[in-house]
């Protein structure tokens, strides 16, 4: 099967050029000046990309399909969530397999492989949430690296659930320093937060807004500082997930200025939404995620955009972890588990679908970042950071033909009525974005075209990732 994408502007993290792209089977095999080669004659399919951008497919390195969490399961399965990702121009996800206390990490990995197997619309890999560090887990970290799971998420938050002590973090970091993997950190001081949560509830402060108020940014800054210094102690590469706070970004920036292998991602919700969204009574539950949305007036958002411009932040992922607002016929009660007690609201927001369009708006549309940087933070760096480059994350000879034709001139209004995620609300309801995803190819196959999905569950393959290609 030969496909030509003709007449578009090919954008990678470093180039912007008018070029035709030739795809043979699953790979990009040639790029050439527009019309300079008569590829159309021998091809099976021609995609006209005139006036459009031709970019490497998005890579979302932080999703939680089907995650058991907060007394329920994230509402997107691998099937629905990966399909929604494709609709939004994301052609690779890296999800989180889970090891819980008392269970083996390899068992957790195999369980998540089974959940995903035969269901994904796009290629996928896994990080591992290590919820129990012991002698066996430390050995399993080596085995997981061999399986292509080269990054391990730990939590300084959620005592009694995923929480690790500083000592456990040191042990895992020592192992990561040895086997070349990366420690990903949920950096919030969960012990201090739990005190504030209990005090708020005792005062009768039960609305969703108190979720945000009891997780102040200073406690993200503190945990980020501690994680960085433990990484310095052990020599492990450290990647701060879902960074939301200026205080945390300042710590990351300082560490990077010291020459450390410290990296961080942020997410669209921290770039576009704010603490005030948690107001409006229980409606605010739609916006409960951790870390929480920050007060708009405190300047976090522009600081994060600035961090993306200076590469103190390297990636925008989503932390996609949807829960329905209204009771669901199969999934039951989700967000409403926390009516009358904000601490029982399942933490998480939907986001895998609109990421590419939202970041295009905030970056290119609003003049903060150029189009190359948009591609870099949404695709190229995620690939390099998590050992997938240049198979993924670029348009180059020999790369997988994971390609999005993006129309910068056709706006779209984001709405739960038209999205494809299995969740009954959009956090961006009614927002108009200036450009939209037009056509999506996954390893050479057209899976989104003319506003229709042409793929099937199981098209996506497991990606055995290498170690980080982004280390200093
Ligand atoms: N934060 C969330 O909001 N949801 C899932 C896990 C997490 O850390
Ligand atoms: Zn987290
Ligand atoms: Zn997460």
Image (tube, grey):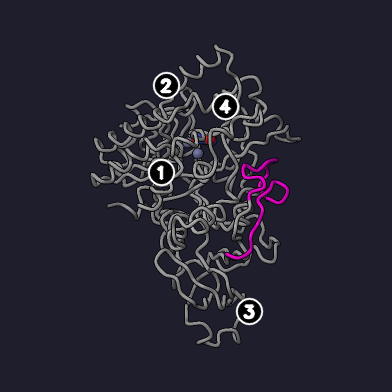
User: How much space separates mark 2 and mark 1, taking CA atoms?
Assistant: 27 Å
Question: Helix, strand, or loop for circle 4?
Answer: helix
Of residue 172 and residue 294, the one placed in the foreground of this image is 294
If you read the primary sequence from the N terminus, does the residue marked by circle 4 or circle 1 appear first?
A: 4
User: How much space separates mark 4 and mark 3, taking CA atoms?
Assistant: 55 Å
Residues packed near mark 3 inside 10 Å, few (<14), some (14 to 19) or many (20 plus): few
Residues packed near mark 2 inside 10 Å, few (<14), some (14 to 19) or many (20 plus): some
Please provide percent x and percent y for residue 36.
Answer: 50, 87
**Residue occupying the point 58% across, 73% down:** 51
> Which residue is tagged 3?
44
State which quadrant residue 16 falls in: bottom left
160 to the left or right of 445? left
Above or below for 410 versus 198? below
Q: In the rendered structure, which segment of residues is drawn in magenta?
A: 407-431
> Which residue is tagged 1?
303
User: For the residue with label 3, is its CB less than 8 Å from the closest atom of ligand 3?
Assistant: no
Residue 455 sits inside the magenta stretch = no
Question: Helix, strand, or loop for circle 3?
Answer: loop
If you read the primary sequence from the N terminus, does the residue marked by circle 3 or circle 2 appear first?
A: 3
> Which residue is tagged 4?
209
User: How much space separates mark 3 and mark 2, taking CA atoms?
Assistant: 59 Å
- Camera-nearest label, 3 or 2: 2
State which quadrant residue 424 falls in: top right
Whether tag 4 and tag 2 are in contact, CB under 8 A, the answer is: no
Please provide percent x and percent y for residue 148.
Answer: 43, 50
144 to the left or right of 96? left
Whether tag 4 and tag 1 are in contact, CB under 8 A, the answer is: no
> Which residue is tagged 2?
191
Of residue 415 and residue 242, the one placed in the foreground of this image is 415
389 to the left or right of 317? left
- Camera-nearest label, 4 or 3: 4
Residues packed near mark 1 inside 10 Å, few (<14), some (14 to 19) or many (20 plus): some
């Amino acid at each position: 099967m030969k496909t030509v994408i003709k007449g578009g502007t090919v954008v990678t993290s470093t180039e912007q050029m008018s070029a035709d792209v030739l795809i043979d089977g699953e790979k990009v095999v040639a790029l050439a000046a527009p019309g300079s080669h008569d590829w159309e004659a021998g091809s099976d399919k021609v995609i006209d990309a005139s006036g459009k951008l031709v970019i490497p497919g998005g890579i979302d390195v932080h999703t939680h399909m089907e995650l058991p969490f907060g007394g329920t399961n994230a509402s997107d399965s691998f099937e629905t969530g990966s399909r929604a990702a494709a609709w939004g121009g994301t052609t690779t996800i890296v999800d989180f397999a889970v090891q819980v206390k008392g269970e083996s990490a390899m068992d957790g990995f195999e369980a998540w492989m089974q959940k995903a197997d035969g269901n994904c619309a796009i290629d996928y890999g896994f990080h591992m949430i290590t919820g129990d560090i012991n002698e066996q887990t430390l050995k399993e970290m080596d085995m997981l690296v061999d399986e292509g799971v080269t990054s391990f998420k730990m939590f300084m938050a959620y005592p009694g659930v995923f929480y690790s002590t500083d000592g456990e973090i040191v042990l895992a970091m020592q192992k990561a320093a040895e086997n070349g993997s990366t420690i990903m950190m949920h950096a919030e001081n969960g012990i201090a937060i739990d005190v504030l949560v209990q005090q708020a509830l005792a005062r009768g402060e039960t609305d969703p807004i108190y979720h945000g108020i009891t997780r102040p940014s200073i406690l993200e800054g503190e945990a980020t500082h501690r994680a960085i210094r433990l990484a310095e102690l052990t020599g492990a590469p450290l990647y701060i997930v879902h960074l939301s706070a200026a205080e945390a970004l300042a710590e990351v920036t300082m560490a990077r200025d010291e020459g450390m292998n410290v990296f961080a991602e942020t997410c669209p919700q921290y770039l576009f939404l704010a603490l005030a969204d948690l107001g409006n009574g229980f409606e605010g539950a739609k916006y409960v995620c951790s870390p929480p949305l920050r007060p708009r007036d405190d300047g976090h958002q522009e600081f994060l955009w600035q961090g993306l411009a200076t590469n103190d932040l390297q990636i925008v992922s989503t932390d996609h972890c949807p829960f329905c607002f209204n009771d669901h016929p199969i999934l039951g009660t989700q967000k409403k588990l926390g009516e009358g007690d904000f601490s029982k609201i399942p933490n998480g927001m939907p986001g895998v679908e609109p990421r590419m369009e939202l970041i295009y708006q905030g970056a290119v549309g609003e003049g903060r970042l150029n189009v190359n940087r948009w591609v870099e933070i949404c695709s190229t760096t995620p690939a390099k950071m998590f050992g997938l480059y240049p198979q993924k994350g670029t348009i180059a000879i020999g790369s997988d033909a994971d390609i999005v034709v993006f129309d910068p001139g056709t706006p779209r209004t984001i709405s739960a009525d038209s999205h494809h995620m299995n969740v009954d609300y959009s956090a961006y309801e009614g927002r108009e974005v200036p450009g939209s995803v037009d056509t999506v190819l996954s390893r050479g196959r057209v899976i989104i075209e003319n506003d229709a999905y042409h793929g099937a569950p199981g098209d996506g393959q497991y990606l055995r990732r290498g170690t980080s290609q982004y280390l200093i």
